Amino acid sequence: MNEFCLKPSDLEQLRKIRRRSPHEDTESFTVYLRSDVEAKSLEVWGSPEALAREKKLRKEAEIEYRERLFRNQKILKEYRDFLGNTKPRSRTASVFFKGPGKVVMVAICINGLNCFFKFLAWIYTGSASMFSEAIHSLSDTCNQGLLALGISKSVQTPDSTHPYGFSNMRYISSLISGVGIFMMGAGLSWYHGVMGLLHPQPMESLLWAYCILAGSLISEGATLLVAVNELRRSAQAKGMSFYKY
């Protein structure tokens, strides 16, 4: 029918023959004489020239449809590449075992331990500087926790309410952690420092404070090494130098 630009209703009055299907699992089918179909197409379209014009129009429409389908598939592929492959996006936990997620989890663990020991040193020594360091580590821990929340949210699969996904959540969480939590930590440190100047108290031995600060320096250095290694690995995967990446 496509070859002669006919509709099923155009074939109802033509001679037809039922033939057995060559396949056992399908029903018999109807065939028509080619001469009858050609005559019917000329009757419907009026002339061979009109039939040829209709074939050309349908061919152009089919080509346009295929091109539009190809463009839509290309746009869909680019959209999926931008968001990341959809298959691993549902596995939220796996994002914390590699890449930025791994660095964030290491930083949370180390900063949490540093915060705990610095608070112990502050309680033991009464040093305002030690309190400031403890608040600094607490701010870093909250900072990394917020980043982990943003990373976890960003890999969720798009839904009907959020068809473009949640990939921007990691940038929003980075903004909040970089501004809000930093200001909170700075404010508490300033407050306690001023109160320490106005109401000085005798300090105990600072030996443990120095030991904890040294341990904090080593642990923070380890976190930095993990981050640098992940950056170097990502740069190699992209075929770029470390500094350019």
Image: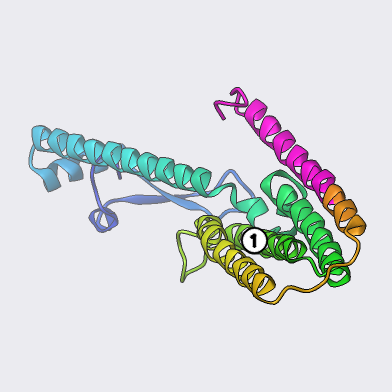
Residue 19 higher or lower than 235, as above or below: below
Q: Is residue 52 visible?
A: yes
Q: Nearer the viewer, residue 55 or 200?
A: 200
Q: Quadrant of residue 163?
A: bottom left
Main SS of residues in magenta = helix
> Which quadrant does the C terminus fall into?
top right
Q: Nearer the viewer, residue 186 or 174?
A: 186
Start and end of the magenta stretch? 216-245
Rendering coords of residue 228 (x, y %): 71, 35
How is colour applied across the structure in the image?
Answer: rainbow
- The amino acid at mark 1 is Asn
Residue 16, how many percent across, how many down?
Answer: 35, 51
**In this rendering, position of residue 117 left or right of residue 142:** right
Can residue 166 be spotted in the picture? no
- Tell me if residue 227 is in the magenta stretch: yes
Residue at which label 1 appears:
143
Residue at 55 percent across and 47 percent down: it is 21
Q: Secondary structure at mark 1?
A: helix
